[in-house]
Amino acid sequence: MPPQSSQLPRIKRTNALGLSWSTLLVYSVPRWGKTRLTRTAKKPLVVACEMGDRRGLGTLSDIDIPFVPCDTMEELLATARALSQDREIATFEGEQFETIILDSGSVAGELGLDSAKATFGYGDYLWDATKGSGKDPRKAYPYMNEKMRQLMKIFFSCQAHFIVIARESVAEEVDTEGKSIRYKVPEFPGQKLPYELPGWPDGTLRGDVVNGQRLLRTRTHMRAVAGIRAPDNVPVPEFIVPNTADICEWMRTWDPAILKRLTPAPPKPINAPVVAKKKEVPVASAS
């Protein structure tokens, strides 16, 4: 029996999508300055799950940035649900926010794995705790993947820009000739999440340093994934300036004026070294 008309979704048009909130994954090596991206965000709230009393936010301690500390996957999910309740603007404890930053997604994945350990009774050390117990530790990873999907889905539905920060790690594969290939990936637990999660947001950007400048790569480089979903008529430079508010607004509007601000200045030419001319020694004429 075909579904009733009330159950059918309605057709929409891609050219009538209008403005929407931006979703981003930003990853880089430690100390590149991922947390500093919060400084340029518009009305941010940090969902902080890094370890320690300062939650890895020490570089922001000179400014007033609100954050919500989360120590478990359950707390992360509860925070995301609370932020998604208001369908006009993301709201938490009566305060409105335009940018939500998960710092970091790498630790959020680890909290998902901790939740799996508790659910299946695996103990602190997954493989050692299940050795000889008849329990399969591999069950923890699909559970963790599903928890992360739930978390991202809820955050993506919030009426605010959403940015996931992640550390950079190294993946290794063997090609058809048996040669080992190493390349950079976002750091998440398990085999699937480092490859799946970069495809979920509208943009995945990788932090880099080029000619002494902190920049964000927008294209995959040496298999390290990066990219932005942009219309074909929108030029996307290979590198953009790490200004969070401008990036999010540009991805909403594709305004060329914003893109101009995001485009890095060309490197200054290096002056060629000045070589001193040799003095010409006059040749004595024959007498």
Image (tube, helix red, strand yellow):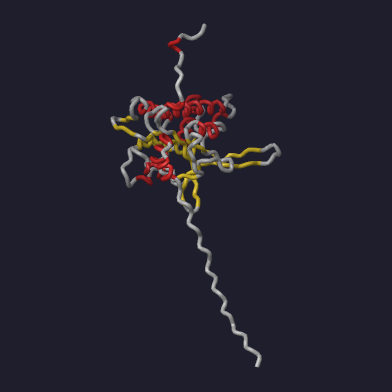
Front in this rendered view, residue 264 or 63: 264
Q: How many marks?
A: 0
Q: Quadrant of residue 84?
A: top left
Q: Position of residue 75 (x, y in %)?
A: 39, 29
What residue is drawn where x is 49% and y is 43%?
Answer: 237
Work out whether 41 lies above or below 83.
below
State the residue lying farthest toward the left: 94
The answer to whether residue 128 is seen in the rendering is no
Question: Residue 66 at what x, y percent from top left?
Answer: 33, 38
Q: Is residue 7 left or right of residue 39?
A: right
Q: Is residue 105 above or below residue 2?
A: below
Q: Position of residue 115 (x, y in %)?
A: 46, 28
Q: Residue at x 49, y 40 (%)?
A: 235
Q: Quadrant of the C terminus?
A: bottom right
Left or right? Give the position of 225 relative to 37. Answer: right
- Image quarter of residue 157: top left
Q: Residue furthest top?
A: 1
Q: Is residue 73 visible?
A: yes
Between residues 219 and 58, which one lies in front from this camera angle? 219
Q: Furthest residue to the right?
A: 177
Q: Position of residue 148 (x, y in %)?
A: 47, 29
Residue drawn at (51%, 32%) of the image: 197
In this view, the residue in front, 112 or 272, is 272
